[in-house]
């Protein structure tokens, strides 16, 4: 294997591990953003759903995503086992491992809509169904020679494929499960069911931020010309602008520089720039990230007013901002960098690329939501309802689903799991 090909493979393996490390960020982010009585459950379900998602992606997910097939789905390469060493480019197993990490991130995002009220069995069944029949279809359409790829759809690292797909599944779950007990009052006002540890949440965001360089810069799939450095620069600028914009808009509107909003702003900047990090100039990355930070602030308030309970803010961070990140290519993609599709509107490309980006949002978002909604209804029928009982929700999922407490020293000695 030539030295340059070896470097490509080493680089992508490193990036894949960085993306896997993002799951640690999600554990801290989700646990810190929810209440203490559910912290152990949230951490544990992340690990076992990674296991389920990995096995399903190996069995059928990769084949549906990247196998030979048609414009809508792949139909080969199931139970992936390519161990051959390539003469140049990525070894098959390295490429597979990297792409698997993206599928697992989408699954974790989807589970944001389950937080603090779903049965463990619902996680198990839906992890299988989402990893097999939702994420791979969208991935094939855009990254696997599908119909949107033919149209020149631009999504360098997954604002649509990963973030919007996961968020639409989360929306379907949130609507079916309905709000957590005590979240909304009869008059429509909401109560702040604050997360128990902002330090965990901040550390989770930082881990995600670091891992995102594997996510975005790794999507170059090579080290030639060190273009990954340019992608990393745009990623950093987008995240920075999102954090700053979210903090200042919260400060201006509420009079307080709200910490959770600032953290969500950083994530929003990362999600927003993910689609366009290889297609735009640095100044545009700042604008894209800043708008993402503003959108996430408004989106959080919108879902709260609409009485849609989103404990992890998956719908806002990954959903509404995923839409913006996708569409932004249609404005800012430059002629020199748009290796697929067309330049954006601001560079004389007209409305062509913008139209493709909007079409992709509608098609992928609708498919992910409808498919997830149907599969969740099937899951509900299998497990006898997605939601735990009122008693179990009050006690907390640590005890009711696992029989142990994430913070045992904080648990009253007489408190027991329901049914114990």
Image (cartoon, rainbow, N blue to C red):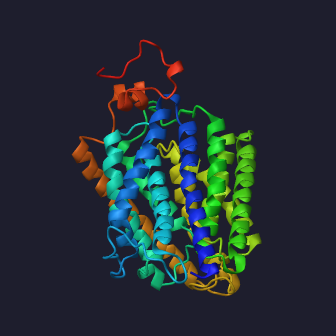
403 relative to 332, above or below? above
Residue 184 in view: no
181 relative to 371, above or below? above
Instruction: Residue 55: give x, y in percent of width and height.
Output: 36, 57
At x 75% / y 39%, what residue is drawn?
A: 255
389 relative to 126, above or below? above
Task: Name the side, left or right, on which 247 lies relative to 26.
Answer: right
At x 59% / y 86%, what residue is drawn?
A: 342
At x 67% / y 53%, what residue is drawn?
A: 266
Task: Name the side, left or right, on which 410 lies relative to 369.
Answer: right
Instruction: Residue 181: give x, y in percent of width and height.
Output: 42, 31
Instruction: Residue 215: give x, y in percent of width and height.
Output: 59, 63
Q: Quadrant of the C terminus?
A: top left
Residue 143 in view: yes
Q: Nearer the viewer, residue 341 or 108?
A: 108
Q: Quadrant of residue 69?
A: bottom left
């Amino acid at each position: 294997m030539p030295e340059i090909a070896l470097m490509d493979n080493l680089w992508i393996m490193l990036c894949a591990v960085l993306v896997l490390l993002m799951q640690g960020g999600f554990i801290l982010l989700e646990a810190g953003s929810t209440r203490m009585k559910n912290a152990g459950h949230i951490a544990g379900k992340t690990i076992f759903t990674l296991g389920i998602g990995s096995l399903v992606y190996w069995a059928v997910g990769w084949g549906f995503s990247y196998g030979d097939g048609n414009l809508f789905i792949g139909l080969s390469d199931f139970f992936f086992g390519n161990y051959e060493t390539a003469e140049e480019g990525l070894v098959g197993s390295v490429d597979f491992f990297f792409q698997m990490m993206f599928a697992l991130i989408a699954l974790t995002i989807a589970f944001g809509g389950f937080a603090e009220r779903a049965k463990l069995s619902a996680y198990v069944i839906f992890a299988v169904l989402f990893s097999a029949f939702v994420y791979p279809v969208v991935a094939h359409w855009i990254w696997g020679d599908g119909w949107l790829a033919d149209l020149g759809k631009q999504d360098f690292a997954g604002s649509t494929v990963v973030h919007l797909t996961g968020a639409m599944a989360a929306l379907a779950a949130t609507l079916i499960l309905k709000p957590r007990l005590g979240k909304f009052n009869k008059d429509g006002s909401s109560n702040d069911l604050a997360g128990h540890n902002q330090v965990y949440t901040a550390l989770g965001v930082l881990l995600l931020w670091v891992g995102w360089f594997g996510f975005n810069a790794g999507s170059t799939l090579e080290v030639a010309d060190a273009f990954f450095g340019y992608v990393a620069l745009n990623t950093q600028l987008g995240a920075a602008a999102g954090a700053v914009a979210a903090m200042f808009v919260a400060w201006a509107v509420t009079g307080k520089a709200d910490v959770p909003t600032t953290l969500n702003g950083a994530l929003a900047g990362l999600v927003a720039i993910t689609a366009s990090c290889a297609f735009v100039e640095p100044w545009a990355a700042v604008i894209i990230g800043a708008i993402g930070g503003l959108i996430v602030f408004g989106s959080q308030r919108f879902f709260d007013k609409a009485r849609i309970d989103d404990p992890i803010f998956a719908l806002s961070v990954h959903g509404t901002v995923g839409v913006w990140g996708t569409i932004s290519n249609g404005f800012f993609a430059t002629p020199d960098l748009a290796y697929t599709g067309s330049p954006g509107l601001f560079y004389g490309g007209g409305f062509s690329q913008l139209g493709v980006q909007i079409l992709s949002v509608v098609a992928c978002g609708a498919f992910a939501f409808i498919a997830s909604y149907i599969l969740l209804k099937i899951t509900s029928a299998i497990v006898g309802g997605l939601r735990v009982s009122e008693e179990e929700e009050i006690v907390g999922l640590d005890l009711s689903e696992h029989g142990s407490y994430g913070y045992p020293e904080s648990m009253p000695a007489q408190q027991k799991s329901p049914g114990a």
